[in-house]
Image (cartoon, rainbow, N blue to C red):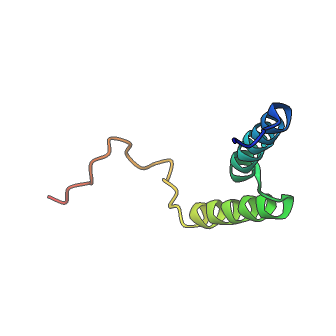
């Protein structure tokens, strides 16, 4: 004889499994803590500041044609 299955419990079990699957996907997508987010933001700001410090500024009296001057 076959085992008797309670369909209500089966449906609830399936719903819980689906919700857990969705929750796992959300944790992967949005699961960063506030500290992790602020650390990433601070590192990005530091990298941008370091990059800006190394930039060379053009003199206002320099030619803007983009070609180097020729010494002839």
- Along the horizontal axis of the image, is 44 left or right of 20? left
Along the line of sight, the residue nearer the viewer: 58 or 17: 17
Q: How many marks?
A: 0
Q: Position of residue 40 (x, y in %)?
A: 72, 62
Q: Quadrant of the N terminus?
A: top right
Q: Is residue 27 left or right of residue 53?
A: right
Q: Is residue 21 left or right of residue 7?
A: left
Closer to us: 29 or 36: 29
The answer to whether 39 is drawn above or below residue 29 in the figure is below
* Residue at x 63%, y 59% (from the top left corner): 48
Residue 66 sits in quarter: top left
Residue name at image x 73 percent, y 40 percent: 18
**Residue 47 vs residue 70, the one in the foreground:** 47
**Is 15 placed above or below 53 here?**
above
Residue 22 image offset from top left, x and y in percent:
72, 42
Which quadrant of the view contains residue 50?
A: bottom right
Q: State the residue at coordinates (85%, 32%).
A: 8
Which quarter of the figure is the C terminus placed in?
A: bottom left
């Amino acid at each position: 004889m076959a085992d008797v299955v309670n369909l209500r419990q089966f449906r609830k079990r399936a719903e819980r499994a689906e919700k857990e699957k969705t929750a796992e996907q959300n944790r992967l997508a949005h699961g960063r803590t506030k500290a992790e987010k602020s650390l990433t933001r601070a590192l990005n700001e530091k990298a941008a500041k370091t990059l800006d410090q190394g930039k060379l500024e053009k003199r206002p009296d320099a030619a803007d044609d983009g070609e180097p001057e020729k010494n002839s």
